Image: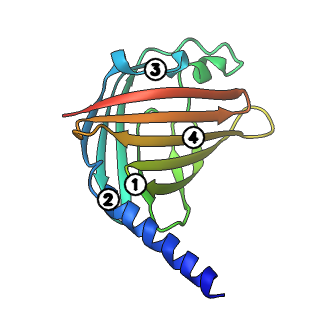
């Protein structure tokens, strides 16, 4: 029993240390370096700016994205999906208390339920986003995103490795941001 208690306390202390180590390090305004990023074609991103406010309790991420024009929607919804889909700009706050945050994202098409969660380890952040997008079919489309954030040693470059899963498959992208 004492071993279990000691193990639990150790894990909690490591989690607190990981959050403290990352505290504030990701804060700032970040501009996407498209030339050094590896983006899926359908993202259609021309430019993107992240504004990040990082504390020991949470991280707020705001994006402003400029996208290439969407292909026409011929009724099968693929034009919209090919252009990156749901919402090009967002402002989400992820908490480090282990609890999931639920919110409704307002898009031009509908109100989209979103579930957010985060995890911190020394030198990295993991942000999880799950959207349930209404679709023309009977079942809504589920979009799950796992972002792993890592800073360069000088703190001037942020690399976000993204794994996005939908019913159509899984895509991997690497976003490289430079601090303004």
Q: Compute the Cα span from label 1 to label 4.
A: 21 Å
The local crowd at label 3, few if under 14, some if 14 to 19, many if 20 or more residues have their Cα within 10 Å, is some
| Label ID, residue 98 | none
As helix, strand or loop, the secondary structure at mark 2 comes to helix
Q: Residue furthest left?
A: 180
Sequence-earlier tag: 1 or 4: 1
**Which residue corresponds to mark 1?**
122
Q: Compute the Cα span from label 4 to label 2.
A: 24 Å
Circle nearer the viewer, 1 or 3: 1
Q: Residue furthest bottom?
A: 2
**Which residue corresponds to mark 4?**
145
Q: Is residue 66 above or below residue 71?
A: below
73 or 16, which is in the foreground?
16
Q: Residue furthest right?
A: 138
As helix, strand or loop, the secondary structure at mark 3 comes to loop
Sequence-earlier tag: 2 or 1: 2
Sequence-earlier tag: 1 or 3: 3
62 or 71, which is in the foreground?
62
Q: Compute the Cα span from label 2 to label 3.
A: 28 Å
- Name the spot of residue 60 as percent of width and height, x first: 36, 53
Q: Contact, CB < 8 Å: mark 1 with mark 3?
A: no
- Name the spot of residue 69 as percent of width and height, x first: 45, 14
Circle nearer the viewer, 4 or 2: 2
Sequence-earlier tag: 2 or 3: 2
**Which residue corresponds to mark 3?**
38
- Name the spot of residue 100 as percent of width and height, x first: 56, 62
| Label ID, residue 21 | 2
Circle nearer the viewer, 2 or 3: 2
Position of the C terminus, as image quadrant, is top left
């Amino acid at each position: 029993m004492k071993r279990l208690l000691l193990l639990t306390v150790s894990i909690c202390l490591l989690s607190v240390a990981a959050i403290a180590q990352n505290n504030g390090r990701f804060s700032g305004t970040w501009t996407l370096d498209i030339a050094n990023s590896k983006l899926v074609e359908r993202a259609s991103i021309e430019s993107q700016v992240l504004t990040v406010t990082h504390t020991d309790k949470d991280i707020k991420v705001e994006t402003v994205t400029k996208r290439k024009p969407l292909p026409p929607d011929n009724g099968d919804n693929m034009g919209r999906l090919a252009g990156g889909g749901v919402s090009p700009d967002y402002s989400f706050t992820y908490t480090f208390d282990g609890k999931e945050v639920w919110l409704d994202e307002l898009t031009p098409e509908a109100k989209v339920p979103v579930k957010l969660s985060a995890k911190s380890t020394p030198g990295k952040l993991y942000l999880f986003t799950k959207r349930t997008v209404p679709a023309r079919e009977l079942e809504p489309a589920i979009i799950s995103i796992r972002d792993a954030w890592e800073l360069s040693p000088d703190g001037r470059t942020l690399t976000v490795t993204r794994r996005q899963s939908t019913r159509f498959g899984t895509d991997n992208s690497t976003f490289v941001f430079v601090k303004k």
